[in-house]
Image (cartoon, helix red, strand yellow):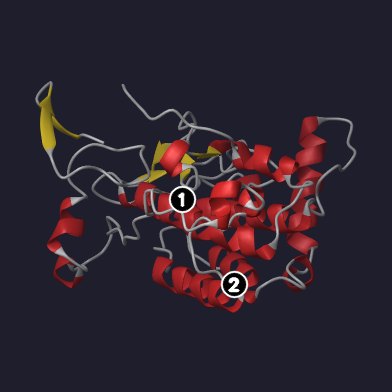
Amino acid sequence: MVIELLGWSLEDRARKCGGKFSPKTTLLVASQVLQRIEYMHSKGIVHRDIKPENFMLGIGDKEHHIYVIDFGLSKKYWDKKHVSMKTRLSLTGTARYASINAHRGVEQSRRDDLEAIGHMLLYFLRGKLPWSGLEAKTSEEKCQKILEKKENFPLAELCAAYPGCFQAFLRHARGLAFTACPDYDMLRNLIAGDSKKEGIRNDFEFEWFEGQDWYLQVPENLVPIKREKFIQPDVPDLSKAPSPEIVARRQGLFCVCGGQAAKSHHRVQGQFAKSC
């Protein structure tokens, strides 16, 4: 397997920025992270370990691109049909960002990735989540305390003083049924609306670039971030899909380049693989 060489993680960048991000930077992160996870979900897979360390930045002319990595805990939620909901499971993932249902031992689906992303975005904004640093004698006791804090901490208070899309993001994720398809378009539009209010004009306006010489000029040599919609496997009528090209993206193997596969296809061991 050949993949691109990547740079810093979002956790590295958060530490570089004093432990948290500005709303402007967090909105830029949210836009790309949503697209990455929507692409992964379109392949019938949930990540199950959303955390800042698992999102990396590119290098060179892709220094502003965010990539998702580490699929060791990933799992299929769709195999011709949605998987059945199991209960009484042990927590999979990172407790700080895990969804409430994951804490409760419920099988994870798309809603859990989205809720974990919502918690991660609030971590970037706040620098610390209300359930961070809880003292406990055992890991089981700590996970239980984290769950209780997540269940009881008011969402309005958690998201207070930040752009409204972050509260709406978490509310939507937490309100989804196990097999429900998230409304990615709605979330994308909410992020775009608040990004416009924050005066964001370009995809590279992360705060850690400020003060660098190339940032003072329009970096025309940067690779643009391609915005796409991806068809989920449970879309009932593919005739309503945005375009045949996007429908075709459901065919073939999983690509870890952020969903920007080349148009050409190559036969590898009897299967088609997209070259990146």
- Which quadrant of the figure contains the C terminus? top left
Horizontally, residue 145 falls left or right of residue 228, namely: right
- Mark 1 or mark 2: which is in front? 2
Percent across and percent down for residue 108 are 50, 47
State the residue in front, 270 or 146: 270
Q: Quadrant of residue 174?
A: bottom right
Horizontally, residue 19 falls left or right of residue 78, namely: right
Identity, as a three-letter code, of the amino acid under mark 1: Ser
What is the distance, in whole Å, between disc 1 and disc 2 at their CAs? 22 Å
**Is residue 22 shown above or below 51?**
below
Q: Is residue 83 visible?
A: no
Q: Are marks 1 and 2 in contact (CB under 8 Å)?
A: no
Q: Earlier in the sequence, mark 1 or mark 2?
A: 1
Which residue bears the numbered disc 1? Answer: 109
Q: Residues within 10 Å of mark 1 (few under 14, many from 20)?
A: many
Residue at horizontal 54%, vertical 76%? Answer: 196
Q: How many marks?
A: 2
Q: Is residue 17 visible?
A: yes
Mark 2, secondary structure of its residue? helix
State the residue in front, 124 or 117: 124
Identity, as a three-letter code, of the amino acid under mark 2: Cys
**Is residue 32 shown above or below 73?**
below
Percent across and percent down for residue 2 are 32, 23
Which residue bears the numbered disc 2? Answer: 165
Q: Quadrant of residue 53?
A: top right
Mark 1, secondary structure of its residue? loop
Percent across and percent down for residue 135 are 90, 39
Horizontally, residue 61 falls left or right of residue 102, namely: left
Percent across and percent down for residue 229 are 31, 62
Q: Residues within 10 Å of mark 2 (few under 14, many from 20)?
A: many
Residue at horizontal 71%, vertical 52%? Answer: 123
Residue 131 circle label:
none
